[in-house]
Structure formats: C-alpha cells, structure tokens
C-alpha cells in the first residue's frame, strides 16, 4: 500500500482554510481544526494485537514517526479494541501534555499505562468536554468493547463530534449502521467533514461494522444530504481484519459516492487535505497495486451504488460479491483471501 512521502513537510504549514485532515491509516486521523490539533485513534504499532509476534500486521508503514508529529492538543479514543487503542502509542503520548478524551471506562487503561488522571476526560454518550476552544462530544455508536478473550464489556464505545469556532467534524469510530446517525446529524451537523468506518465488514458481523454503502448512507444521514462536506473513508487499507480484499472498501466508497453525487476524499495514507479546498484527493490510487475484482470494476460499481438507496437493494450488492471468475469460483479476487479475526 503506497504512503504519501511528504507528510511532515505538508503539515508544517498551517491549513489555509482552518481545517485539514491527515489520514494516517486505519482509523488514525490527525485533524487540524481552528488552530488546534486532534489525533483520533492513534495506532503506530506494527500489529493490532496483544502480541508482538502474531496478529494482523500493517500493510504499509506509518507515514511518519510519532515523535515527528509535533504537539497534539487532544487525543480522542473511540473504544478499546487493539486496532484503535494501541498501548505502545499511548505510552509514548503519555509523556506529552496532550489531553485524552475517551468513552466511559477506557480511562483505566490509560492510567495503567502512565497517563495522569488530570489529563483524562471520560465521557458518556451525549456528554461534552471543552478545551482550548474545542467542544468534544461523545455520541452513540453501534459496536462492542473488550481487550481480552473473556470480553467482559466493562467499557463504552463512542463516535465523536469535535467543534471549533469555525468548523465541526465527525469521527464514527467502529459502528454498524443505525438510525442514530440522523439524530446526531440533526443535533450536531452538518459537518465540514465526516470520517466514516467502511472496512472490515462481513455478513458474519453485520451489526458492528458498516459496508461502504452503509457508510455513505450514514454520511448522508449526518449531513442531511450530499451537498455538505466530504466523507473520508477510514478503517481500511492498513490491517486485514476481514475476508474481503483489502482494496474493496475504497472501491465501494468511490462507487457509493458517485451513485448519490456526494463528495468523498480518497487520500493515500499520510496525504493531508483540506475539505474545503478544490484539490481534495479523489483518484482511486489503490488500482495501481490491487487486483481487479472478478467481473470488472464497472459492474461492481453499478451494483454497489444501488445498495445506498434502500435496504432491500442489499441483495443486488450481495450478487455483485459473488460474480464468478474465469475458473467458475465465486469471489471478487483471483485468489482466496486469508481469513483473519475481526477487530
């Protein structure tokens, strides 16, 4: 997976519009908003796993070292799964002056790893904390929690709204599609940009991760229509956490956006962009390194886009997923994907 090569130089200059997003891979995003810097779900580790020798490994290096990122005002954590809450990364940030905004119960992990209680803000859904001119609100999501095999469900998960003096943005964390997106949009939107989970989906866990079509539906619910700020697809192209080919979420997000005329940002990992600028990255960069789906991309796009409009069209999307290749084997890729546990 290609990585943007000039991330450090690009973020050294302040954003001209007051808002800039840099997708670092998976769900990690650096948001520079109204003079403040917010870092979502920072995972700089090589694996999203409790073990250094096993578990899903990166498909690309981090765009720049954590120490080179510079000062961060707030670190926002969506939930405590290993691909969103990375112990080595948190320990490295514990020695800085950053504030940590987390859902209920997650603060215990951070305190154990060296973050002082005075720099923690633990929020329930619909609660808000303010710092440095930013309002951070924990909003509902449809997911689950836990870092062990027993999975005791003692912590909360959340999506997040961050609002500054001029801009407001939304990060979904991990979630299945639900009607709550409309309520969040009505109360806090529209947004200058949304960061929406669109990867690691499967028919085996349809309620906890969204497909690209569902992600676009969530984006439209949040924005009240396709005319507002763009969607940045997250939670893909960094760790293989499902059986679909790694590039399928990008392809699906592009098709979903085209089907409804919505804006979508498609940066390479580490490529900063300003949502209000004219040069928002929109090229399908993954096509240069990924296998094409069986049946061709045009067919996949046409059928995938149908899934946004009504839930009953999901059958058409499923049919697109089972287009046979030349050997008669069902599937999108020319090779059987490796099955890995969901994050």
Image: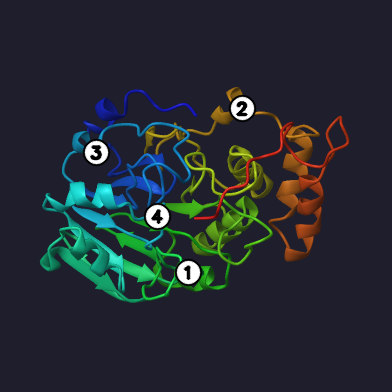
Report if residue 203 is visible in the image. Answer: yes
Q: Are marks 1 and 3 in contact (CB under 8 Å)?
A: no
Q: Residue at x 57, y 70 (%)?
A: 178
**What's the mark number on residue 66?**
3
Residue 223 percent location from the top left of the image: 50, 60
Q: Earlier in the sequence, mark 4 or mark 1?
A: 4
Q: Earlier in the sequence, mark 1 or mark 3?
A: 3
Tell me if residue 187 comes above or below residue 210 in the rendering: below
Q: Earlier in the sequence, mark 2 or mark 3?
A: 3
Q: Which residue is mark 2?
A: 287
**What's the mark number on residue 82?**
4
Q: Which residue is mark 1?
A: 144
Q: Residue at x 36, y 73 (%)?
A: 155
* CA distance for labels 4 and 1: 12 Å
Label 2 Cα crowd, 10 Å radius (few <14 / some 14-19 / many 20+): few
Viewer-nearest of discs 2 and 1: 1
Q: Earlier in the sequence, mark 3 or mark 4?
A: 3
Residue 246 percent location from the top left of the image: 59, 39
Secondary structure of the residue carrying tag 4 is: loop
Viewer-nearest of discs 3 and 4: 4
Secondary structure of the residue carrying tag 2 is: helix
Report if residue 34 is visible in the image. Answer: no
Viewer-nearest of discs 4 and 2: 4
Tell me if residue 260 comes above or below residue 290 in the rendering: below
Q: Are marks 3 and 4 in contact (CB under 8 Å)?
A: no
Secondary structure of the residue carrying tag 3 is: helix
Q: Quadrant of residue 128?
A: bottom left
Label 3 Cα crowd, 10 Å radius (few <14 / some 14-19 / many 20+): some
Q: Are marks 2 and 3 in contact (CB under 8 Å)?
A: no
Q: Residue at x 57, y 48 (%)?
A: 340
């Amino acid at each position: 997976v290609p990585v943007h090569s000039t991330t450090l130089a690009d973020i050294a200059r302040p954003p001209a519009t007051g808002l800039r997003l840099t997708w670092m891979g998976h769900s990690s995003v650096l948001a520079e908003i109204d003079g403040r810097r917010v870092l979502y779900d920072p995972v700089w580790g090589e694996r999203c796993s409790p073990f250094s020798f096993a578990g899903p490994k990166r498909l690309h290096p981090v765009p720049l070292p954590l120490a080179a990122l510079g000062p961060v005002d707030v670190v926002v954590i969506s939930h405590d799964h290993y691909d969103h809450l990375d112990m080595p990364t948190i320990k490295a940030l514990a020695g800085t002056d950053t504030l940590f905004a987390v859902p209920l119960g997650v603060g215990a992990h951070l305190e154990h790893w060296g973050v002082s209680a005075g720099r923690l803000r633990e929020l329930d859904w619909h609660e808000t904390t303010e710092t440095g001119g930013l309002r951070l609100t924990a909003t509902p999501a449809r997911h689950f929690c836990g870092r062990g095999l027993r999975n005791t469900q003692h912590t909360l998960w959340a999506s997040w709204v961050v609002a500054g003096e001029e801009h407001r943005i939304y990060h979904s964390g991990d979630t299945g599609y639900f009607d709550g997106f409309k309520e969040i949009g009505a109360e806090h939107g529209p947004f200058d940009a949304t960061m929406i989970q669109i990867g690691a989906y499967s028919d085996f866990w349809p309620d906890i991760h969204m497909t690209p079509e569902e992600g676009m539906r969530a984006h439209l619910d949040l924005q009240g229509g396709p005319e507002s700020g763009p969607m940045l697809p997250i939670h893909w192209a960094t760790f293989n956490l499902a059986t679909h080919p790694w590039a399928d979420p990008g392809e699906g997000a592009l098709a979903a956006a085209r089907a409804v005329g919505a804006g979508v940002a498609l940066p390479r990992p580490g490529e900063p962009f300003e949502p209000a600028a004219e040069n928002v990255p929109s090229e399908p960069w993954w096509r240069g390194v990924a296998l094409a789906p069986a049946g061709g991309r045009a067919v996949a796009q046409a059928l995938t886009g149908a899934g946004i409009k009504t839930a009953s069209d999901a059958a058409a999307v499923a049919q697109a997923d089972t287009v046979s290749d030349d050997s008669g084997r069902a599937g999108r890729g020319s090779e059987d994907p490796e099955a890995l546990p969901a994050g």
